[in-house]
Amino acid sequence: MTSHRSTAPLAFSGSRLSWADLPRSVRARIAELHGAEVVTESAATSGFSPGYAALLGMGDGTEVFVKAVSPEQNPDSPDLARAEIRAASLVPAGVDAPPLLWSHDDGAWVMLGFAAVEGSAPEYPWRPEELTRVLGALTTLAEAGTPGPTGLQRLADAVAPMMTGWARLAADGPALDRAADAVGPHREWMVAHLDDLVAWAGDGPAAATGDSLVHGDLRADNVMLSPEHVWLIDWPHAATAGARWYDLLAMLPSVAMQGGGDSADHFWSHPNAQGADPDAVRAVLAGLAGFFVHGSVQPAPPGIANLRAFQIAQGHTALEWLRRF
């Protein structure tokens, strides 16, 4: 795996640990798990995990992409790493996802070693040919992942906490004022339609229900492109029993933010969205918009200072789309 190659704006990332930052015991355990000493390191710079993520060259001539995180970097990240370990064994063979070679959890540090794959992240602004390939991979994911596997959280349960953003803003005057300022040109519409937004988002978990596996967190920084493959990486939010259009819808606000074109046009012309109920789509979109806007006016989580800017940027594009329903 390689780091993001783009220097264009609208690329966001968290802070990463380096190999030297890892405790000696963790470095030794990684070498033991792989069966060879570490010779080279190429750090990943995209994504939001505050832990360690790097492509390691090993003394036996192999390469492995390693993630490692503990509660010291962020209290929630170890549980996400554990979820990714569970998901790795359930991704269907028809989906291009790097295989998990090994993992270890000592109760504090969680470590994962993935097969190294060739590829680079999409460029910003999105190139049309790269976006076409990525959107095509979502069709493959929906086809290979239907019916969804057992052993994962149901999507309705996974997204239910996310869909409370507007209700939480409605109950918190100061946060609502901050959100109104943050959404800029959408301020008057948001305030006038707040009750509608709360109601639509409340229907979001049920509206997102289906019978497919979903990645749950697809964005450009969770995709890698090679000439032959569209690799879908970072699966800690994977869920089952989801609408086959969920990943498409959830990804498009970031695509629009990063110069990829009109969200509605991409959505309604995509095979995954054929037959989708517009009311269900609006409910899920409203829930996601509320998640982005509410999150953006909260204090930054430990180790992920850039997350709030990324959320409000997606909040803007989600609201632009939502206002057209």
Image: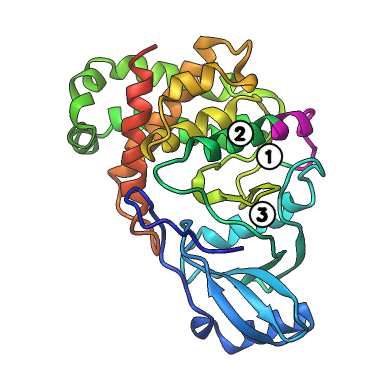
In three-dimensional space, the C-alpha distance between marks 2 and 1, rounded to whole angstroms, equals 7 Å
Q: Is residue 173 left or right of residue 39?
A: left
Mark 2 lies on residue: 157
**Taking 201 as reference, is 296 above or below it?**
below
Q: Amino acid at mark 3?
A: Glu
Neighbourhood count class around disc 2 (C-alpha, 10 Å): few under 14, some 14–19, many 20 upward:
some
* Quarter of the rendering occupied by the N terminus: bottom right
Q: Is residue 113 left or right of residue 264?
A: right
Question: Which contiguous range is marked in magenta?
Answer: 140-151
The secondary structure type at the circle numbered 1 is loop
Observer-nearest of 221 and 69:
221
Neighbourhood count class around disc 1 (C-alpha, 10 Å): few under 14, some 14–19, many 20 upward:
some
Task: Give the image's coloring scheme.
Answer: rainbow
**Taking 19 as reference, is 114 above or below it?**
above
Mark 3 lies on residue: 84
Mark 1 lies on residue: 153
Q: Residue at 65% across / 43% down in the picture? A: 238
Residue 289 place in picture, x, y as percent:
39, 30
Residue 103 place in picture, x, y as percent:
73, 68
Q: Amino acid at mark 1?
A: Gln
For the view shown, which residue lies furthest in the right direction?
A: 93
Neighbourhood count class around disc 3 (C-alpha, 10 Å): few under 14, some 14–19, many 20 upward:
some
Q: Is residue 221 left or right of residue 274?
A: left
Q: Is residue 80 on the magenta stretch?
A: no
Q: Is residue 167 visible to us here?
A: no
**Residue depth check, mark 3 versus mark 1: number of the one nearer the observer:** 3
Residue 104 place in picture, x, y as percent:
72, 71
Cβ–Cβ below 8 Å for labels 3 and 2?
no
The secondary structure type at the circle numbered 3 is helix
Observer-nearest of 67 and 223:
223
